[in-house]
Amino acid sequence: MRRTLNFIFFLIILSSCNDNSASKEDQQNALELNNAASEFLMNGEISKAEKFYSKASKLDPENIDYNYALIGIFIQRKEFDRAHETLESLPESNKETPYYFQTKGYIFEKAGKLQKAQLNYKKAYKLTDPIKVKEETDLMPLIGFLMLETLAGEKDKAVNRINKVLQSSWLTNSNKEYLETFRNEFEYYSGKGNSDFEQKKDLTLCTKNIDSLEKVLKQRHINISGTSQTNEKYDKIYISKKYEKGLKNLKTKICE
């Protein structure tokens, strides 16, 4: 659930720049309803959250953030028709924005229609300007843009951009680790949409030297989803199946 809602909240942050003709009182009341809805959402009270977001949207219909929040709820419930209806209810001026097409793509993706999803991701990508990276605060917007670029079928461009940024002298070790993690995700992207970026433990690698194997996997740009060190004969490292092609000629075996 959090993955779905985080995607929508990311769009909300980017799209929160609307002019508004609602009265200040209505805007304030809507904001309070929104805050309450967010609390309900975090506590798993989805129906209450939907009710409060709906009230907020009626009070302040020009604030599209509330509609995006509702879309997130409908996607989580697999109510894709309602998600589309809510998206299409946005003002016409919002229907030529990257946020509109990216959200539309995401709804199609979660409904299992990956071709239609990618078509809309491409439309969003064409409407989005690349992020210029000058300081640490630019890194998160950069990753958002590169994720869209990858979803739009341009993963090589995304990898090249991130490798270029990795050459910046001002990056901290934490910054580099953050960028390298996403670089690896984009490099091995297999075309399955946002689910491709989830940490999965599809494959288990057995090893007698876990530190050495971790270094080798890092060199091959393979992200590790988890490890298990026990008193058994082998220690274990877990990775997503999409990284399997990066294991070529690696002597370590895949085990159950």
Image (cartoon, rainbow, N blue to C red):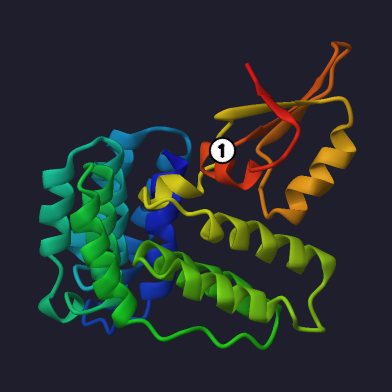
Amino acid carrying label 1: it is Ser
Question: Which residue is at the front of the view, 9 or 51?
Answer: 9
Query: Up-down: is 12 above or below 233?
Result: below
| Residue 93 % position (x, y) | 16, 81
Question: Which residue is at the front of the view, 152 or 134?
Answer: 152
Q: Is residue 189 visible?
A: yes
The residue shown at (39%, 46%) is 4
The residue shown at (23%, 66%) is 120
Query: Up-down: is 243 above or below 126?
Result: above
Side of 254 where 128 appears, left or right: left
Query: Up-down: is 216 above or below 177?
Result: above
Residue labelled with disc 1: 240
Which picture quadrant has residue 143? bottom right
| Residue 149 % position (x, y) | 41, 71
The N terminus sits in image quarter: top left
The C terminus sits in image quarter: top right
The residue shown at (22%, 60%) is 104
Residue reaching furthest to the front:
249
The residue shown at (61%, 63%) is 183
Q: Secondary structure at mark 1?
A: loop
Residue reaching furthest to the top:
232
Q: Is residue 36 visible?
A: no
| Residue 109 % position (x, y) | 27, 49
Which picture quadrant has residue 85? bottom left
| Residue 12 % position (x, y) | 38, 66
Label 1 environment density (alpha carbons within 10 Å; few <14, some 14–19, many ≥20): some
